[in-house]
Amino acid sequence: MYADVGNKHELHRFWRFFKNSAGFYNSGYLHITSSLMKSDDFAGAEEVWEEWLSLKTLFDIQVPNAMFTCYSKKGLWEKARGICEKDYREWELGAYSFDLLATGYSVGGLMVKAAEKIKKAISCLLT
C-alpha cells in the first residue's frame, strides 16, 4: 500500500518494525525490496539487498529475481547484470533468472547480450 502511493518514509518505518518483531524471513526481504523498487527508492532497496546477502541464511532465488525484474523494468540492465556476476559466487542461477536478464537486455535493444542469457537459460534446462 505504501509503495503504491510512493510513501518511502512509511515503507522504511514498517520495515524497521517488521525486522525487529518478526526476525528473518526471505519473504519479508522479497516484499520490501520489491516495494522499495516500486517506489523508485533504489538506494533503500540496495541497502536491504546488501543486508539480505550478509545474513548468509537460506537462499531464496525470488529475492534476487525481484531485483532483476525491477532493474530491468527501469532499464538498469547493467545493475541487473552486476547482481548476477558479483553477488552469486556461492549460488547457481536458474533458467528463470537468466530469462529475466535476457528480457531486460532485449527490451533495451541489447540483443547479443540477450541471446547469451537465453543460451544460459537453455543450458540450465538441459542439465
Image (cartoon, grey):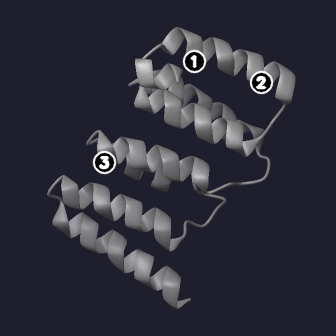
- Local packing at callout 2 (Cα closer than 10 Å; few below 14, some 14-19, many 20+) is few
Q: Hey, which residue is sitting farthest left in the picture?
A: 109
The answer to whether one can see residue 51 in this image is yes
Res 11 label: 1
Q: Position of residue 78 (x, y in %)?
A: 32, 46
Q: Nearer the viewer, residue 84 or 60?
A: 60
Q: Which residue is mark 2?
A: 19
Q: Residue at x 37, y 42 (%)?
A: 71
Q: Nearer the viewer, residue 70 or 43?
A: 70
Query: Above or below — where is 24 with respect to 14?
Result: below
Res 77 label: 3
Q: Earlier in the sequence, mark 2 or mark 1?
A: 1
Q: Position of residue 18 (x, y in %)?
A: 75, 23
Mark 1: amino acid: Leu
| Horizontal side of residue 41 vs 51, given as left or right | left
Q: Hey, which residue is sitting farthest front in the picture?
A: 1
Q: Nearer the viewer, mark 2 or mark 3?
A: 2
